[in-house]
Amino acid sequence: MVDPIPEALAEPGSAYSRESEMVDLAIGSEETGQLLSVNWARSSVFGARGENASSIAEAELSELQLSSLGAIIAVASDSAASRATVQGTCCTSLTATGATTLADTVLECLLLQGQVELPVDPGPNTVVVDGAGIRIVVNEQILRGDAVGELELVVNAIHISLDEAVLDGLGIVSGEIVIGRSTAGLTCESRLRTPCEDAADCLDRQACVPDPEMSGSNRCACVGDCNLDGRVRSNEITAMINIINGIADVTTCLAADQDGDGRVRANDITMAILNINQGCPAQL
């Protein structure tokens, strides 16, 4: 895979912003010669933590030239840019939007029998070429996560995939060329399995419970989140009531016992109901 964009990474505080730039970028090999040249490339990330969290990533290249691959594929662009945005309230609702902008971008592909000018604002996952082991997608958008506890969006301005494609002078080639990739994502703290010794190490309305994925370790979880999926549901409130009434044992929902004393009380249910209505407490 060839991805010419420099990385811009951030460890966010309450708000964050990072940017990276490169100039006069050239990529190639002995087999291909100069494959890709870019006059200027920029990537940036910015956003904010808190109740209304956001993560935004942008990538932009100017004066892009992808030399002809085995006389099959070539791309020339004045500017290619992508943008990925993820925002929302942790453990309640996260949303993602993406976009690609292509200025005076021309694709030349033997399968197209000539040159094609790509749209300025292509729709998501616009397939331009798909055949003979060559697939070219513009404004490719790849979404991962459940949109509740975590969500990630990857936007590729141009994605060229080669699957045993026959290229003159290069033979049979498989690989990826990604131009202008932006990746934005949010992950709730509850999904990060915050370690704990007791409830004092956790946020309000959280309990310290055994971590099923790490033997011998504990993690913070929302009070009432019996299955540890980052959300509290009505059936889990019912499970807590059954524990209070002696119908079920506390081991059936360890997250029901906020203070870890082996008992479930009315205030535990109150916290669980708040977690249903307000979302699990977490800071992004």
Image: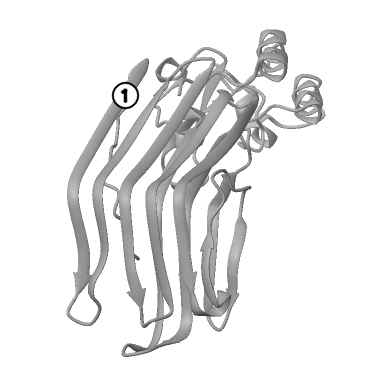
Question: Closer to the camera, 259 or 205?
Answer: 205
In the image, 163: left or right of 12? Answer: right
Q: Quadrant of residue 241?
A: top right
Q: Residues within 10 Å of mark 1 (few under 14, many from 20)?
A: some
Please provide percent x and percent y for residue 39: 23, 49
Question: Closer to the camera, 76 or 52?
Answer: 76
Instruction: Find disc 1 in the rendering and name its residue.
Output: 17
Amino acid type at image mark 1: Ser
Q: Is residue 114 visible?
A: yes
Query: In the figure, 27 relative to 154: above or below?
Result: below
Residue at the image position 54 percent from the left and 55 percent from the top: 118
Q: Quadrant of the C terminus?
A: top left
Question: Closer to the camera, 25 or 84?
Answer: 25
Q: Is residue 3 visible?
A: no
In the image, 240: left or right of 148? Answer: right
Please provide percent x and percent y for residue 17: 31, 24
Residue at the image position 53 percent from the left and 81 percent from the top: 133
Please provide percent x and percent y for residue 26: 20, 60
Q: How many marks?
A: 1
The colour scheme of the drawn protein is one colour
Q: Quadrant of the N terminus?
A: bottom left
Provide the secondary structure element on which disc 1 rests. strand
Please provide percent x and percent y for residue 116: 54, 63
Query: In the figure, 39 relative to 197: above or below?
Result: below
Question: Closer to the camera, 204 or 77?
Answer: 77
Q: Quadrant of residue 231?
A: top right
